[in-house]
Amino acid sequence: MIGKASVRGAALLAVAAVVLAGCGDSGSDDSGGGQSGALEGRGPIKFATGKDTSGNMQKLVDEWNGKHPDEKVTITELPESADDQRDAMVRNAQAKSKEFTILNMDVVWTAEFAANRWVEELPQDQFDLDNFLEPAVNTAKYRDKLYAVPVYSDGGLLFYRKDLLDAAGVTEAPKTWDEMKTACDKVKALPGNAALGCYAGQFDKYEGLTCNFSEAVQSAGGSILDESGKPTVDTQEAKDGLNFLVDGVKSGQIPQAAVTYQEEPSRRAFQDGELIFLRNWPYVYAKAGATDGSSKINGKFEVAPLPGKSGPGVSTLGGHNFGISAFAENKATALDFIKFFTSEEAEKSNLLATSQAPTRANLYDDKELVEKFPYLTTLKESILTAVPRPQAVKYGDVTAAMQEAAYSAINGQASTDDALKDLQSKLESLTTQ
């Protein structure tokens, strides 16, 4: 069942579409785009993506290449940071370069890339979108047209050391921030545990902080935008959410090192046994459960919904979509490769290899997969109730403002009141242009 949060998220998507429709440069002839309107041409293509940490992406590419020797795909790995990946893709588009063919885009980039005509519109009737998770499909559309295909979805999850909680007499995963703190105190009181960090997420000044900050606000009952599209961060609820992060760092519940964490450093800290609780994406499950000696906590952790101020928290909607560069050659090959990569077989293969969230809904009910990944039911609910980040043509400016506000408060450079007041003003300017 889809909860209130996803209804609110859907409303925000609709509002965002109205806001974007009023942007002066969203579809003008001088926007720098170059869409031909035709997906033609066959031959080799290049696939721009973040780091392939599992090797399964290359495995699928190799499978494609073996069957299509004249239409080979080459992976171009971009930097680890999502912000740096976006910058590389934007530079490629602004230069009208043919270097990238397929773009592995964060779900929140669709509006910006589509409005600037940096990616091609895709034929909706060639994809069985009814079989994909609806929130994931919504992230791939702009003005009701399809500009990408959802490949990976994502919902934030709470990874926790069940062995440590059991030893401390804590029988259930925490549902609230206070319960999490109490559990941490009990674990750290046991011999040898005093140096453990209680909780970490992704608090470096990058896109991950936008997600973590949004989740904190939402999990305190607040929102970034209301249903009419008006910014709502200068509120008590938003203050409570940001204070959860600020006070966590001040008290030491959140280790000081966490203000430098992106996804991978936080994942490594957890699987090296340095943390009791970690907020991260589902891909961590496979890494932390590795049996090759790379993880110190294999068999010692479990997964739960994110906690919130007074009950279960609300995730930010994450994930990635594949789009086709408007400036590329061999777009027909690119379209077929996306169909291959988003097939049920490929998505199941990827889940088994990486524990990343699939976008095909039926895989969450596959008995074999649920047995191997018991968290799938929790993950599906996290995705269905997740709230999207603000979709904006000038998303780079929006997320930069959110990161600046959260980071300055977390690091004691601004009070939460001042940070949120300034953010409110900046978002009002960005969403009314």
Image: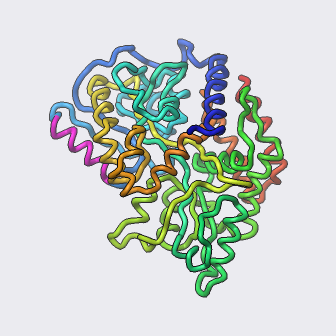
Q: Depth check: 351 or 26 in front?
A: 351
Measured from the top left, where is residue 263 in percent x and y?
A: 52, 56
Q: Which SS type dominates the magenta stretch? A: helix
Above or below for 200 versus 125 = below
Q: Is residue 400 left or right of residue 280?
A: right
Magenta residues, as a range? 55-67
- Residue at image position (61%, 36%) is 6
Q: Is residue 224 magenta?
A: no
Q: Depth check: 364 or 206 in front?
A: 364
Tell me which corner region of the image, top left, top right, bottom left or bottom right, holds residue 254.
Answer: bottom right
Measured from the top left, where is residue 205 in percent x and y?
A: 63, 51
Q: Depth check: 112 or 238 in front?
A: 238
- Residue at image position (51%, 51%) is 378
Above or below for 247 versus 230 = below
Q: How many marks?
A: 0
Q: Is residue 206 left or right of residue 137?
A: right
Measured from the top left, where is residue 307 in percent x and y?
A: 65, 56
Measured from the top left, where is residue 330 in percent x and y?
A: 28, 24
Q: Is residue 60 magenta?
A: yes
Tell me which corner region of the image, top left, top right, bottom left or bottom right, holds residue 7.
Answer: top right
Tell me which corner region of the image, top left, top right, bottom left or bottom right, holds residue 170.
Answer: bottom right
Q: Is residue 192 left or right of residue 375?
A: right
- Residue at image position (56%, 41%) is 317
- Residue at image position (61%, 62%) is 200
Q: Is residue 227 left or right of residue 325?
A: right
Residue lying at the far bottom in this picture: please name it. Answer: 191
Position of the C terminus, as image quadrant, is top right
Above or below for 100 versus 403 = above
Colour scheme shown = rainbow
